[in-house]
Image: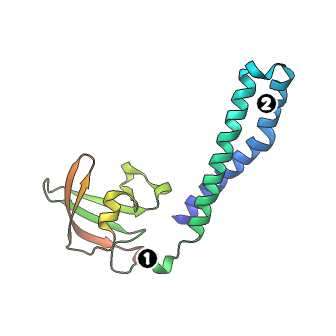
Amino acid sequence: MIEAVKQKLQAEVEQLNHELSVVLPEALKKAIALGDLRENGDYHAALERQRFIQARLSHLRSRLIKLSQIDLSKIPQGKVGLGSRLVVQDMSTREKETLELVIPEAMDFEGGQISVASPLGRALLEQTVGVIVTVRLPDGVRTLKILELATFHEQIQE
């Protein structure tokens, strides 16, 4: 999971570096050739895009560094943590759902993946099977019971 996210982010870094070093200089050159830079929309758009790309690259590089620093040995065993797949039951509707705790970049709401940094993810962290968790979400309060748990470490062994 983490390696896939790192590869995705690295691919975006490479694409943005290409745009920053090849595409934008050509666009700026064409815009400058048009003259009067004060009212040149192409020139200002290219500069704005350049600033955006530089900010995005800075953010991506920071995320890549943080992802590289994740110590998989610190993910809890026997408790909910990063990479855990669990089945929970909503105590009010009695419906069951499968969730997987992932890093924010890997989230897929329709696939049941939630971020460990989300309110629900934080409420579930470090919990065990049988525990009832109550969490306040933007659309109300949810009370969930953890029915099944497959930790990151258990899934690797399978």
Cα distance between the residues tagged 2 and 1: 47 Å
Instruction: Tell which of 115 and 151 is nearer to you.
Output: 115
Within-10-Å neighbours for mark 1: few <14, some 14–19, many 20+: some
Give the x, y percent position of residue 156: 46, 76
Quadrant occupied by the C terminus:
bottom left
Give the x, y percent position of residue 148: 26, 70
Q: Which residue is mark 1?
A: 75
* The quarter of the displayed image where residue 146 is located: bottom left
Give the x, y percent position of residue 24: 77, 36
Callout 2, which amino acid? Ala
Q: Which residue is mark 2?
A: 27
Residue visible at 53% across and 65% down in the picture: 2
Give the x, y percent position of residue 13: 67, 51
Q: Is residue 113 left or right of residue 11?
A: left
Colour convention of the picture: rainbow
Residue visible at 30% across and 60% down in the picture: 98
Q: Is residue 94 left or right of residue 75?
A: left
Instruction: Tell which of 133 and 33 is nearer to you.
Output: 33
| Sequence-first tag of 2 and 1 | 2
Within-10-Å neighbours for mark 2: few <14, some 14–19, many 20+: some
Q: Is residue 126 left or right of residue 88?
A: right
Q: Is residue 124 above or below residue 71?
A: above
Tell me whether circle 2 and circle 1 mark residues in contact (CB < 8 Å): no
Q: Is residue 158 above or below residue 112?
A: below
Q: Secondary structure at mark 1?
A: loop
| Disc number for residue 35 | none
Q: Secondary structure at mark 2?
A: helix
